[in-house]
C-alpha cells in the first residue's frame, strides 16, 4: 500500500513539474524590429533571436527529459504489480469498510491518472500512444475499466477522439499509424 501511495504522489508531483515547465518556462520569441529599424537594431535583434533559439533548444531538451520521466511515473501507477494500484491482494483478510475505501480511492484516482497521462501524450504530439491508452484501459488483466463511471469513460473517449483527429491531421490513420499508399 505504501508503494501505491508513493507512486501516486510521485506521479502527481511529476505532472505538476511537467505542466509548469510546459506552460510557463518556454522562452518567448523576441519581437521583430519595425520596418524603419536601424542597422544596429536589426543586428541586436539577430543576437536576441540567436539567444532565443539556444534557449528554446535547451527548453525542448528539458521538456523531452521531463516528458519521459512523467510518463514513466504515470505508467507506474497504472501498471502496479499484483492486482493493480491500491488493489490489495490480501482481500480475504480485509474488512468490508477498508475494501470499500480502497475501491473508492481507485475510482477517484485512476481515471485522473489516465487523463493526466493523456494530457502529457497529446500535448507532446504522441498521438499514437495517447490513442493506445484505450487498449490499456480495456485490458482484461488490469481491469482498469471497472473503476470508471459512465461519465469518466465518456470523458476519456472524448480525449482519445481528439488525439485520433490530431493524428488524422498529420496524415496518419485514426490509430496514429502512417498511411500506406
Image (tube, rainbow, N blue to C red):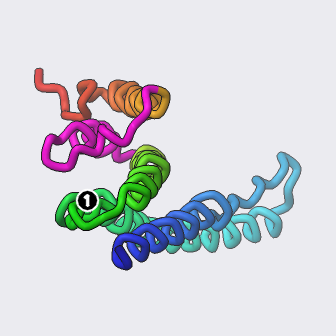
Q: Which residue is mark 1?
A: 84
- Across and down, in percent, residue 17 comes to 56, 70
Query: Regarding mark 1 in the picture, which secondary structure is present there?
Result: loop
Which portion, as a residue range, is magenta?
125-150
Instruction: Specify whether 37 is left or right of 22.
Output: right
Q: Where does the N terminus fall, quadrant-wise?
A: bottom left
Quadrant of residue 147 within the rendered picture? top left
Q: Is residue 119 above or below residue 19?
A: above
- Residue drawn where x is 42% and y is 76% of the image: 6
- Residue drawn where x is 70% and y is 70% of the image: 48
Label 1, residues with CA under 10 Å away: few <14, some 14-19, many ≥20? some
- Across and down, in percent, residue 31 comes to 77, 55
Q: From where the camera sits, is residue 166 visible?
A: no
Q: From where the camera sits, is residue 35 visible?
A: yes
Q: Residue furthest top?
A: 181
Q: Is residue 112 above or below residue 40?
A: above
- Residue drawn where x is 85% and y is 61% of the image: 38
- Across and down, in percent, residue 90 comes to 21, 67
- Residue drawn where x is 22% and y is 37% of the image: 138
- Across and down, in percent, residue 98 comes to 41, 61
**Magenta span includes 149:** yes
Instruction: Specify whether 144 is left or right of 116.
Output: left
Q: Main secondary structure of the magenta part?
A: helix
**Magenta span includes 37:** no
Q: Where does the C terminus fall, quadrant-wise?
A: top left
Quadrant of residue 49 within the rendered picture? bottom right
* Front-lying residue, 11 or 28: 11
Amino acid at each position: 500500500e505504501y508503494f501505491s501511495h508513493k507512486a501516486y504522489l510521485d506521479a502527481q508531483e511529476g505532472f505538476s513539474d511537467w505542466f509548469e515547465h510546459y506552460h510557463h518556462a518556454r522562452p518567448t520569441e523576441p519581437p521583430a524590429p519595425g520596418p524603419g529599424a536601424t542597422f544596429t537594431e536589426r543586428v541586436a535583434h539577430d543576437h536576441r533571436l540567436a539567444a532565443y533559439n539556444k534557449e528554446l533548444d535547451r527548453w525542448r531538451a528539458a521538456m523531452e527529459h521531463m516528458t519521459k520521466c512523467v510518463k514513466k511515473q504515470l505508467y507506474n501507477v497504472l501498471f502496479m504489480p499484483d492486482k493493480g494500484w491500491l488493489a490489495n491482494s490480501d482481500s480475504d483478510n480485509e474488512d468490508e469498510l477498508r475494501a470499500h475505501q480502497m475501491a473508492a480511492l481507485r475510482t477517484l484516482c485512476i481515471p485522473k491518472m489516465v487523463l493526466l497521462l493523456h494530457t502529457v501524450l497529446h500535448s507532446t504530439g504522441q498521438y499514437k500512444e495517447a490513442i493506445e491508452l484505450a487498449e490499456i484501459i480495456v485490458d482484461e488483466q488490469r481491469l482498469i475499466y471497472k473503476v470508471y463511471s459512465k461519465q469518466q469513460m465518456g470523458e476519456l473517449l472524448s480525449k482519445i477522439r481528439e488525439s485520433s483527429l490530431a493524428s488524422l491531421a498529420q496524415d496518419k490513420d485514426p490509430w496514429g499509424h502512417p498511411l500506406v499508399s
